[in-house]
Amino acid sequence: MPINKLKLQNFTIKLFSVLGFLVSLYSYYVEMKVEHDKNYIALCDISEHISCSKAFNSHYGRGFGILNDIFGEGSILDQPNSLYGMFAYFGMFLLALTDRIKMSRVFLNVTVMCNVMSVYLGYILIFILKDFCVICVSTYVINFVLVVAAYKKYHHLISLSHEHDRKNQ
């Protein structure tokens, strides 16, 4: 039974990593379309205050509004947040392929950092941009599911390790 629990945790992590990657890919697509076609209206642009394009094309939509301030606009790190998201979700998917405790701890730390960024970007979205971005909020939910799954997997692997140690004593 414990192995099935681990399989379910890994499935959840892989599924939500793929979902996160796809949502980030769509976000990147919208950003590129808006950049090249000013008349383009994305499916996620519902009204003036419910607009993903507004969030994506804001100062905070590239380099999280931080990297571009530090390294300057046009630097190699001044990339759309969605690109960072694609790399992060791809990395999370790869980290889910192993059931080693150390890698699970790395994965947990990555998901915690992603959730810290979600809180930061959520604050920006609500209080500075005064916008609601369906795509952005979707990534926040995905990140939350991933951190919960990462926490459960990490603690499950630790308990399996303790169980294994007790049997071998």
Image: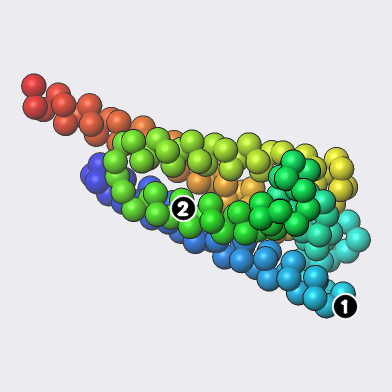
CA gap, disc 1 to disc 2?
A: 34 Å
Q: Where residue 18 sits: x, y (%)?
A: 49, 61
Q: Name the image quarter holding residue 153.
A: top left
Residue linked to disc 1: 39
Identify the residue at image location x=38%, y=50%: 96
Q: Is residue 62 left or right of residue 148?
A: right
Report the side of 165 relative to 120 (left or right): left
The amino acid type found where label 1 is placed reads: Asn
Q: Quadrant of the C terminus?
A: top left
> How far from the left and from the top, in percent, is residue 58?
83, 54
Q: Position of residue 8 (x, y in %)?
A: 35, 51
Q: On screen, 139 above or below 69?
A: below
As rendered, which of 17 and 34 lies closer to the eye?
A: 34
Number of residues whose C-alpha sits closer than 10 Å to that of mark 1, classed few (under 14), some (14–19) or many (20 or more):
few
Dot label at residue 24: none
> Camera-side residue: 150 or 29?
29
Residue 118 lies left or right of residue 112; in this view the side is right
On screen, residue 122 above or below 79: above
Q: Is residue 83 left or right of residue 12?
A: right
Residue at numbered disc 2: 91
Q: Secondary structure at mark 2?
A: helix
Screen quadrant of the N terminus: top left
Identify the residue at image location x=53%, y=46%. Answer: 145
What is the quadrant of residue 118 in the picture? top right
